[in-house]
Image: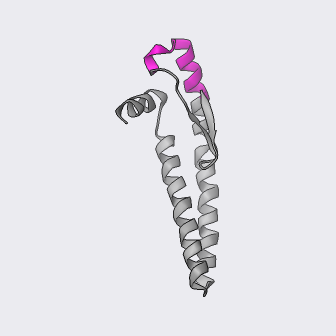
Amino acid sequence: MFQYDKRLGVPVPILQHDWLLYTIEERQQITLEWETIRGTIPDRIRELEKQIHRKQSQLNEEENFDQSCRLNTEISELASVINDLWLWFRTTPDVYEERKMHT
């Protein structure tokens, strides 16, 4: 029901069926596991924020234009991952299923 997302650094729900097709017990188990995973997301975000701060410090000292561009790109990607993690943090399995149905 969950698959590790290498980019995000956490497992994310991969529901095979509509949420309501799962039994109550299955939904409770999925929700329990998701709550455990969700609890790790703020720590993951803090790790990524530290990486951004290190790269910003490097960027402040960098004189090479190509290196500056590379650092900016890396900072942007890390910020994108943080944004996606916050979206997942606010997602519950039933909301995820609704979102999946609308895409």
Q: Main secondary structure of the magenta part?
A: helix
Residue 52 falls left or right of residue 100: right
Q: Quadrant of the C terminus?
A: top left
Q: Position of residue 15 (x, y in %)?
A: 52, 26
The structure residue drawn at horizontal position 55% and vertical position 32%, both measured from the top left corner, is 13
- Point out the image quarter for the N terminus: top right
- Where 43 falls versus 77 (above or below)? above
Please state the extent of the stretch shown in magenta in the rendering. 19-33
Q: Nearer the viewer, residue 28 or 78?
A: 78
Residue 16 locus on image (x, y percent): 52, 23
Q: Is residue 86 above or below residue 101?
A: below
- In the rendered view, tell whether residue 88 sits above or below residue 95: below
Q: Is residue 31 above or below residue 46?
A: above
What x and y, as percent, mark residue 73?
Answer: 54, 68
Residue for point 64% across, 64% down? 51
Q: Residue furthest bottom?
A: 63
Residue 3 in which image quadrant: top right
Residue 79 screen position, x and y as percent:
52, 60
Question: Who's the residue at 47% across and 32% down the image?
Answer: 92
